[in-house]
Image: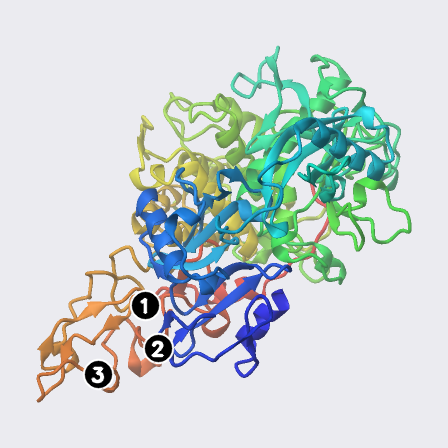
Amino acid sequence: MSLAWLLLLTLPNAPRLDCRGAALERCPPGLAGPACDLPCDDAACEVAVTCHANGDTYGLSSFGAHLFALDPGDPDWLVRLRVLRFILDHPTDLGLKPDLRAHDLGLASAPARRVAAGALQLLRFEQRWRDVPLFGADATLTLVADRAGVIAIRGSVVDGREDYAFAAAPAGRDVAEASIRAHAAARAAVDPAALRLVDLRLVAFSRARTLGWAAAVFRGPARVADVVVAADPRAPVLPLLYHVDPAGAGLGDTLAIEVRAEDLATDIFTAPIETKTVSTVPGGPLTGSASDGPVRLADEHVVLLDAAGAASRGEALASPIVSQLGAHFDAYPDTREYALQNSYYLLRSFYAHTDAILRGRWDSALPTIGLASALPPEQFSPRLVVAADPAAGLCGSASWCVSSAWGGGTEDPPEALQHPTSAAPYEVVGAMYLKGSSYAPAVLPHEFGHFADLFAAPGLMYEPFVCMPCAADCYPGTTDESLPLSETFASLIALWLYRSLYPAAGQAASCKTFSTLSLGENRNPHNEACRPAGDEFSRFLDNYDPACPSDEFDYPDLCDRPSQIDIDFDEGTGLCDRQIGYMVDSWFQAFWELLHGERCATTPPYTCTPLPALTAAPAADAIGRALLYAAQVSSGTYRGFADDVATYVACNHGEAAYLELNEVLCHHAIRPCDAPAPTLCEFCGDGVRTGREACDGGDLGGQTCAGLGFEGGTLACDATCRLAQDGCMSPGTGSEATGEEATATGEPPTTGDSASGEPPATSGAGSHFIDPGATGGDQAEDGCACAAAPGGSWWLAALALARRRRRRDRR
């Protein structure tokens, strides 16, 4: 059905069909939809229908128009009322019979679930058929709305007038339980007595127009299947309607587990470390997998290998997955088993926290080896394979490192490299090699930062030249900085994880957090608690810069920017020395302030005060997202990376938050104090005219009908932040301007300069979105349109689109 959906959009002369294959008449100008009753006043607009295979309408999507008006702040009851009104007014568009009434619909009155999706918002409503809960995708009706209204509906609208089979006298619970056991046992080739059912319930199965019994089926701790059977009271074994084996979606049979791990709310730096039993990670349960009995510290996202005895990376990746009998990993501290289970819990927590931001935006690393991924971008999630405690060091001179591995090069790759589990072609995975089994607190979050770098965009943040005769110097301000920058980024991600997940270590006054993470000589936070004697904080300056606060050669103490003598001789990359990236305390101090939403005084005592706009974001979330965004578009220089962070904050949190961020970066000499925002971002619908918007709500930018050459009248702003001139009076006639007359008067003056070829602000529908391919702008991750500000680094945006990075082993 998706093919038909595309044809509707791409072939204007193709026959119009509804979801059941019936021919539809072409709509007259100004109308769209199956019933030609949806307003569509733009020549480029269209309403597309998506369908279930059984002929049900699964949803509507409007392009260049809105299905109905909706304000993001409307309360749930009003949203529900407007949804009902739309359904009642447009039953044919939704595949329903006419003469529909409100009580025929099963739209729950419970609060809608609202999900932010950048500039869009998803509103989810539960559906029922005559008070019976639905099973499957249609159990939820989802609205997709922008700032002006609803642009799409997902989910079949359930009509209570339709009769469902077996509703009068459904089969009983006992026969349903026996039938589900029988179907699941036959498919899994196990004894039905070995299976147990969870959440057995009567449901409405809308696609079959029947009532059924549904349950999740388990064998021991492992989930075997999800099953629905028809509630036919005449059948000794109820007919099978639905069977899904969840094993194909994960590493083995995923199941919930518990582990004893360090208590992140306590002091993790001082022995003895307090522990507790944990069963969750950010956003959900802690999961492992089962395989023929043992429970393993592995799921589709993180796999922990016991690499004891491995003398090579290949041997390490073929090592067995850490496992035991039972789903409760309860080894106590000072044992090897505890160290392994604690590492799995921490890495799984880091992954979940990061995946909440990058889900749907992770980038496959297959292009780095010249192959294309078979997975759509929105479906790809990377896997982290951790090889712990090998017999030999596998990271050169370092004890720990992150690289990549691939199972596609062998006929029978180790299970850990079979990603996705369901079938080849396999994806590149992140491979973390850890010397020993117990690590300093800073090791795992820093190394996880490299994993995030590897999959935030194809490859790593730097390109290894391996050409010492070509460039026997480190050139600051160029991409020579990219190698140490990759280490700085990993440490900044570690600081973000500390701030977000460690209630004790993440406190602003936690001085030990720096002393364990940084390898610099000035590694205390820039605040009064950690600098009671008023010691100077660090600046990102060359040691010989006149602005450096010390006349002594104290690098890397107070002034820690890479210099020409910091050459990477060890690895021979022709870049600046990797080790410098661990020592840039100026960056660590600045971002520690920002993660806490604080600015600290530049003279002792270093009293810190809140940054209101960033605190409201909140700060840790805004800065964490900005760091990940910068990894996706990094220019390979420290200044470029700082500009990328500033771009994200300005674009998504406004000018006030940008000014706060830049003030802190300025104190540490990371960005110029008077640097303007790198981008102008438009938020159409917020009531403030910005960027290339001609207007926004009541903010018309001082423009009037008379100023546009009309006799007078009322100038307004439409939902796409274009001037609506229909209320203006035509010169000489005193009547309202027609569409042609309004167009003939020309477009109003805006921030664009017609002499320079800048397009007018009112040109084209949806002018508040900029096509990066057409303008060289950068479409930010949260949907706002960004254009280079006057005097800004426009070339950074062009680089962001063209930039692709190779992978390489690193610490």
Kindly indicate the quadrant of the structure image that contains residue 275. Answer: top right
Q: CA distance from mark 3 to mark 2?
A: 23 Å
The one nearer the camera, 331 or 431, is 331
Q: Are marks 1 and 2 in contact (CB under 8 Å)?
A: yes
Q: Is the residue under label 1 in contact with that under label 3 (CB below 8 Å)?
A: no
Q: Earlier in the sequence, mark 3 or mark 2?
A: 3
Q: Whole-percent x and y of residue 711? A: 9, 82
**Mark 1: secondary structure:** loop
Q: Using the rendered view, name the quadrant where residue 667 is placed.
A: top left
Q: Is residue 33 visible?
A: yes
Q: Are marks 3 and 2 in contact (CB under 8 Å)?
A: no
Q: What x and y, as percent, mark residue 795?
A: 48, 67
Q: Callout 3: 10 Å neighbours few (<14), some, many (20+)?
A: some
Name of the residue lying farthest toward the right: 411
**Residue at 57% in and 72% down:** 22
Is residue 82 shown above or below 707? Answer: above
Q: Check the picture and name the quadrant holding the N terminus.
A: bottom right
Residue type highlighted by circle 1: Arg
Mark nearer the N terminus (3 vs 1): 1
Q: Quadrant of the C terminus?
A: top right
Disc tally is 3
